[in-house]
């Protein structure tokens, strides 16, 4: 992970002082609610259903054990002893007071953390592939580029009052594990296919000569889910900041400000057409290109040298073929590593009965200790709301598993139906139309048979409590969306969504990412698990072998057979409302 | 009454202001007025709401692309807590919204001692000075 130098630290410290003064003026009545709102939001502070919510940034999802201990301390001292890891790879506290927020920020700054731009109409926390640096299909380690973008976006003076929020994701592997096609900007760190023999002959450093980015814009979820468009196949790394700046400037000037539901960049890209939008960005970039914000090799090296990289030992891969519970866990929660003798391990925060993504202060501290002992004192937060130890020795895997089990974070369900992504929903969020957490729990309880779950195989089930889609329901293979019907909570079901991770891009640059389709009228809360069961029934009957996942099957068959088995079923609670022809 | 401030000082309200003023609204395109910039006494950029950030891009374009050197004044919903960013984008005069305390607003120039990005105030990004 990146270590601050004195300037980075000073900037964060000055932010704490600035926000302390702003809070003081607000509490003293010198700053109105309207004038204060954008300021507190840009510090991650919402006013929620019961109390303010504070969202703390975990840049591109990387945390040190020391930082996790501080997050535990904050949970204990200012909250009710737990925190919620979010799909933005951040952590949220649901019960702090506004008065305490400056002190929390000061505590965070003491471990090189902050809540800068975790909300508001600005560039948000940069997210990335949680297996960066370790995945075998990695092309470029994206974390150095993420940090360069983090610094560029932090307090960018021109882009603090955009039409709407702005999210950037970076992925550096063949497989897209960062949902890059569903972000305002998605970046694929890639290597230029054509080598440059002349440069190599001249003795130039080949390390950076060939790195660049595929640039995707205009993806997103929310009210209008859109799959992003590639506007540049290869952007040489030197131009990363000027090009992103050109996109942001076009958006800042021309993005809609008359209607907040049409203010995201995806609407601008749609209204102008991707080709026209691309031309505008390129024209703006021609003016900025090769200017002072062009990246230098020295800067890339400087950032790289401030990262603490794991000191791997020279090991051999072990032949691991365990059976029983350990084997089941290994199959789902252990990920291959590019270094021989190592693996990456996912800690499941999806135990039945615990809100998805939640961890207690005690768990956080124990996990921090395990990170020190098993994974170079570092861990990652995934956008699927789990934690990752990226660098675990294979010969210590079983010992780690035992310890994780004791902590309740070894549920072997990564990639399975019960690894549910869910927002905090109506239990906490003031935007939500409906609850998410009890729905997740009811589904997890119904699908508690591990053998059955493993037989169903890879399945993303995502739940959002409202159309803002913090729970990523649009890209769930099965998506559940809370809606409000005359004051009552109902749930709309979609199938066939896909965040796009498996297999990466086709040669034509097509993404497997897709948005789910609604199967029909909504259901009451207690009916949702029953509906999921009916959908699974169709899949198990119709699938062409175990390799065909639920989502592939849904794409092949279309929604009709699924719809039929839900609305046309003898026990269907919606039968009376929606007669389905045989 | 709305007070006019510049970095480090409150402008003298009795001093008369002469010359032609060019006023831009958030939707205006600086390229369309580029030819007039040499002839005006000052340019005013209006912020109908402080949350409308288009004026920040306008300011940078005026300074960095069209070479405007004269006074660039932010007017309208101009508040203490946006002054630091406004100054970095090239504004050098700020007509504060009426309820704003001018003394408080002057301290805003010192909110941060460093910044990562290139800006009108410091055309080199931090990494070229680090």
Image (cartoon, coloured by chain):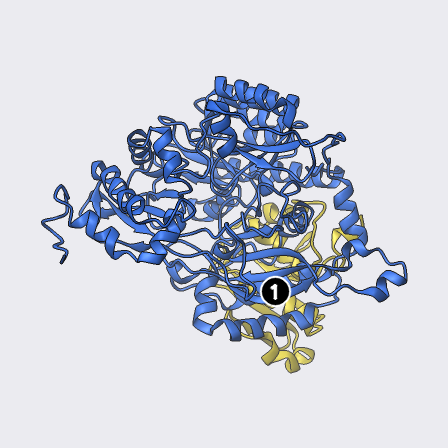
Residue at left offset 42%, top offset 52%: A498
A575, B68: nearer the viewer = A575
Mark 1, residue position: B73
Q: Colour of chain B?
A: yellow
Residue situated in front as seen by the camera: A243 or A111: A243
Looking at the picture, does residue B90 appear above or below residue A139? below
Q: Chain of mark 1?
A: B
Q: Let me know if residue A389 appears in the view.
A: no
Say which of A98 and B21 sits in front. A98
Name the side, left or right, on which A146 lies relative to A459: right
Residue A409 location in percent, x, y? 48, 25
Which residue is at a point 54% across and 66% down the rendered structure image? A508
SS category of the residue bearing label 1: strand
The tint chain A carries is blue
* Percent position of residue B130, x then y: 80, 48
Question: Where, by quadrant of the figure, is residue B11 drawn?
Answer: bottom right
Q: Residue A523: percent from the left, percent from the top?
A: 21, 44
Q: Is residue A35 left or right of residue A141?
A: left
Please rate how many residues cluster around mark 1, counting C-alpha atoms within 10 Å: few if below 14, some from 14 to 19, many from 20: many
Location of the N terminus of chain A (image quadrant) = top right
Choose between B107 and A321: the one closer to the eye. A321
A462 sits to left or right of A529: right
């Amino acid at each position: 992970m990146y270590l601050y130098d004195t300037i980075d630290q000073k900037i964060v410290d000055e932010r704490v002082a600035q926000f302390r003064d702003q809070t003081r003026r607000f509490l003293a009545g010198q700053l109105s609610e309207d004038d204060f709102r954008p300021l507190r939001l840009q510090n991650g502070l919402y006013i929620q259903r019961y109390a303010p919510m504070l969202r703390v940034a975990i840049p591109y999802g990387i945390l040190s054990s020391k930082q996790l201990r501080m997050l535990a301390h904050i949970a204990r001292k200012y909250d009710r002893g737990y925190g919620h890891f979010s799909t933005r790879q951040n952590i949220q506290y649901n019960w702090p007071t506004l008065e305490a927020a400056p002190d929390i920020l000061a505590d965070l700054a003491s471990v090189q953390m902050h809540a800068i731009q975790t909300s508001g109409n600005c560039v948000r926390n940069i997210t990335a592939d949680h297996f960066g640096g370790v995945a075998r299909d990695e092309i470029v380690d994206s974390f150095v580029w993420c940090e360069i973008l983090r610094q560029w976006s932090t307090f960018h003076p021109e882009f603090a009052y955009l039409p709407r929020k702005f999210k950037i994701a970076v992925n550096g592997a063949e497989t897209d594990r960062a949902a890059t096609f569903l972000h305002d900007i998605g970046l694929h760190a890639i290597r230029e296919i054509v080598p440059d023999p002349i440069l190599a002959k001249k003795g130039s450093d080949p390390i950076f000569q060939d790195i660049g980015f595929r640039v995707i814009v205009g993806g997103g979820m929310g009210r209008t889910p859109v799959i992003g468009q590639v506007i540049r196949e290869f952007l040489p790394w030197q131009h990363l900041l000027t090009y992103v700046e050109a996109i942001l400037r076009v958006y800042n000037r021309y993005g809609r400000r008359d209607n907040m539901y049409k203010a995201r960049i995806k609407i601008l890209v749609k209204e102008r057409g991707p080709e026209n939008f691309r031309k505008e960005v390129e024209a703006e970039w021609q003016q900025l290109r090769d200017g002072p914000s062009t990246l230098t090799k020295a800067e890339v090296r400087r950032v790289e040298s401030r990262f603490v990289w794991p000191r791997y030992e020279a090991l051999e891969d072990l032949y691991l073929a365990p059976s029983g519970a350990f084997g089941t866990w290994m199959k789902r929660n252990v990920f291959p590593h590019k270094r021989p003798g190592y693996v990456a391990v996912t800690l499941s925060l999806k135990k039945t009965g615990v809100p998805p993504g939640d961890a207690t202060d005690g768990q956080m501290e124990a996990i921090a200790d395990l990170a020190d002992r098993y994974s170079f004192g570092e861990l990652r937060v995934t956008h699927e709301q789990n934690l990752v130890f990226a660098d675990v020795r294979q010969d210590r895997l079983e010992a780690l598993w035992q310890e994780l089990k004791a902590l309740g974070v070894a549920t072997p369900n990564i990639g399975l139906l019960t690894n549910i992504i869910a927002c905090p929903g109506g239990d906490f969020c003031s935007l939500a139309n409906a609850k998410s957490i009890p729905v997740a729990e009811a589904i997890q309880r119904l699908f508690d048979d591990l053998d059955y779950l493993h037989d169903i195989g890879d399945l993303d089930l995502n739940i959002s409590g409202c159309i803002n889609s913090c729970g990523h329901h649009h890209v769930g293979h099965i998506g559940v969306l809370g809606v409000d019907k005359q004051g009552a909570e109902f749930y709309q079901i979609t199938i066939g969504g896909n965040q796009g991770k498996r297999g990466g891009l086709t040669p034509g640059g097509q993404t497997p990412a897709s948005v789910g389709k609604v199967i029909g009228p909504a259901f009451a809360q207690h009916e949702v698990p029953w509906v999921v069961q009916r959908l699974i029934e169709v899949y198990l009957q119709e699938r062409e072998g175990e390799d065909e996942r639920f989502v592939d099957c849904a794409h092949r068959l279309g929604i009709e057979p699924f719809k039929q088995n839900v609305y046309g079923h003898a026990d269907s609670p919606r039968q009376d409302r929606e007669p389905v022809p045989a | 009454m709305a007070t006019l401030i510049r970095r480090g000082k409150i402008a003298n309200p009795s001093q008369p202001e002469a010359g032609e003023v060019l006023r831009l609204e958030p939707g205006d395109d600086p390229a369309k007025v580029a030819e007039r910039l040499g002839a005006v006494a000052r340019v005013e950029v209006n912020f109908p709401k402080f949350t409308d950030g288009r004026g920040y891009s306008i300011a940078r374009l005026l300074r960095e692309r069209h070479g405007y050197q004269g006074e660039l004044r932010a007017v309208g919903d101009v508040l203490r807590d946006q002054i630091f960013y406004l100054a970095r984008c090239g504004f050098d005069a700020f007509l504060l919204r009426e309820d704003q305390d001018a003394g408080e607003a002057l301290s805003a120039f010192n909110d941060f001692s460093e910044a990562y990005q290139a800006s009108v105030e410091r055309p080199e990004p931090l990494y070229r000075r680090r």
